[in-house]
Amino acid sequence: MQYDRRKFIKLTGSITTGLALGSAGSMSLFSSCANGAGSIDTFGLQLYSLRDDMPKDPKGVLKQVASFGYKQIESYQHDELGIFWGMGHKEFKKYLDDLGLSILSTHHGVINGFPDNRSDFEKTAAECAETGMKYIFCPWLGAQKTLDDYKRKAELFNQCGEICKKAGLRFGYHNHEYTFQMLEGQMPQDVLMQNTDPALVDFEMDIYWVVTAGQDPEALFKKYPNRFRLCHVKDRMKNTDEREATCTLGEGIINFPKILKTARDNGMQHFIVEHERYDGTTPLKAVEADAAYMKKLKL
């Protein structure tokens, strides 16, 4: 997920190398996995993909999302409508139930004010649990100045994880590319993962941002089995070094059949589509096309 207030962060490492890591031998970046087959029966949508449409007509947009074949949604904290889109959490759940949707998770900016906002977060966690939600994710830290800064954030994650555990759900962190840029000789993502309690904190891998940083998603799944429980399925345009270069699933250079099989084999449980850039189409048409790809995807 990307927010307008963020400034452009120059890409580091070789994007081309990172993208190539998704393939093996002569296997095409677009080929199906030869070692075993399977489909993803249930997949979700991060509602930030429809950030311009949702505030205008939340119920109408969600109805269209359900018609595309999505079964789960991941919400985010809208400045005015919140994570339940102007509805109480119980009304929101009922409306989703009527559409055949469930709310799996949400992105929430709790870490920005934590621990001063602890009581507010406890209330939010309780409401989220009542909807049947399973996860609350911190979507953005921003690049920290030192590794000690990341360690302090990891401790805050543990505290948030304790609150979520008591409420009956899980807390986690969603990455961007900056945690994969070397700092003081280490990768900040490693610091976050090694200083958070697996009993309290999970991770949601945004595969697009890992590839954009020139890293190998499969190597990370194998290095940290059962730590990445959700992922953002978001493709990257060919022949560009632009930072924000999302495209329709299957039209880019990320080998999702291979990568997602490795993810599933190492504990991945949920697959969430996200789309951020729309060239020559509309957000709703883009996520409809993404859903069609996910229905046909074989691992």
Image (cartoon, grey):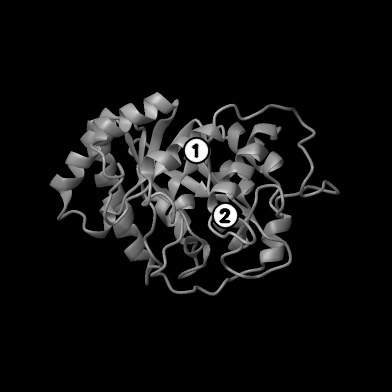
* Relative depth, front residue between 68 and 120: 68
* Quadrant assignment for the C terminus: top right
Label 2, residues with CA under 10 Å away: few <14, some 14-19, many ≥20: few
Residue receiving disc 2: 282
Residue depicted at 43% across the width and 54% down the height: 51
Q: Position of residue 147 (x, y in %)?
A: 38, 65
Disc 2 element: loop
Residue depicted at 26% across the width and 39% down the height: 87
Q: Residue furthest right?
A: 26
Residue type beneath disc 1: Gln
Disc 1 element: helix
Q: Position of residue 237 (x, y in %)?
A: 68, 60
Answer left or right for 114 relative to 254. left
279 in relation to 30, above or below:
below
* Relative depth, front residue between 132 and 258: 132
292 in relation to 138, above or below:
above
Residue 299 can be seen, yes or no: no
Residue receiving disc 1: 64
Residue depicted at 30% across the width and 34% down the height: 92
Residue type beneath disc 2: Thr
* Relative depth, front residue between 116 and 13: 116
275 in relation to 96, above or below:
below
Q: Position of residue 209 (x, y in %)?
A: 55, 58
Tell me the CA gap for discs 2 and 1: 13 Å
Q: Position of residue 211 (x, y in %)?
A: 62, 57
80 in relation to 273, above or below:
below
Q: Mark 1 or mark 2, which is nearer the start of the sequence?
A: 1
